[in-house]
Structure formats: structure tokens, C-alpha cells
Image (cartoon, helix red, strand yellow):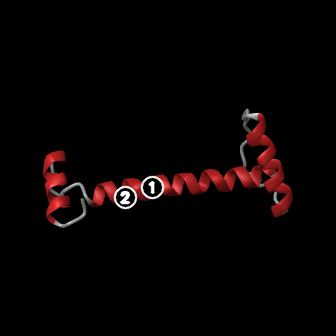
Amino acid sequence: MSELSKRSTVYFEPEIHQALKIKSAITHQSLSQVVNEAIRLALQEDREDLSAFEERAGEPTLSYEELLEDLKTHGKL
């Protein structure tokens, strides 16, 4: 483990812990590596979502009724 790594105690539900141990064994990675990768992917997804929100912040909004009408007009409903 890297000198820059931080230690933390995390409590998993038994089923999740078992699944992590199995994935760890199958992938020949430590449990810490499996958890770090899962968290890294989740945080990346959050960053992508926030980026998409920022990109679309200036777009006009539609009311629910306007959205339904637009979908009907374009044959989506």
C-alpha cells in the first residue's frame, strides 16, 4: 500500500462484504483495491453528472404539460 494511503474503518453489510471478498479473490486484487476502484468509478460518474448539469444550465425549461405535448407532437407518446 502506498505511503500516501489513509486508513479508515468501514462497516459492510455481510452480503456486500462477502461479494467484495469473492471479487477480490477472482480479480487477484486486495479488498482495498476493489473498494477504491468502486468508489473512484462512483465519484467519476458524479463528476460527469455535474458537468452535464453545468453544460445544460442555460437551456430553456419546459413544464411537465409542455413536455407531454412535445412528446405527443413528435409521436413519442
x, y percentage for residue 71?
20, 60
Q: Would you say residue 4 is visible in this rendering?
A: no
Residue at 56% from the left image edge and 52% from the top image edge: 42
Residues packed near mark 1 inside 10 Å, few (<14), some (14 to 19) or many (20 plus): few
* Dot 2 and dot 1 residues touching (CB under 8 Å): yes
Q: Is residue 27 left or right of residue 77?
A: right
Q: Secondary structure at mark 2?
A: helix
Residue at 72% from the left image edge and 35% from the top image edge: 10
Residue at 18% from the left image edge and 52% from the top image edge: 68
Inter-mark Cα distance, 2 to 1: 6 Å
Return the mark for residue 47: 1
Residue 37 sits in which quadrant? bottom right
x, y percentage for residue 73?
14, 63
x, y percentage for residue 6?
71, 43
Return the mark for residue 34: none
Judging by the rendered image, the residue that carries numbered circle 2 is: 51
Of residues 25 and 65, which is closer to you in this image? 65
Of residues 74 and 16, which is closer to you in this image? 74
Of residues 46 and 66, which is closer to you in this image? 66
Quadrant containing the N terminus in the rendered view: bottom right
Quadrant containing the C terminus in the rendered view: bottom left
Q: Would you say residue 69 is visible in this rendering?
A: yes
**Kind of residue indicated by mark 1:** Arg
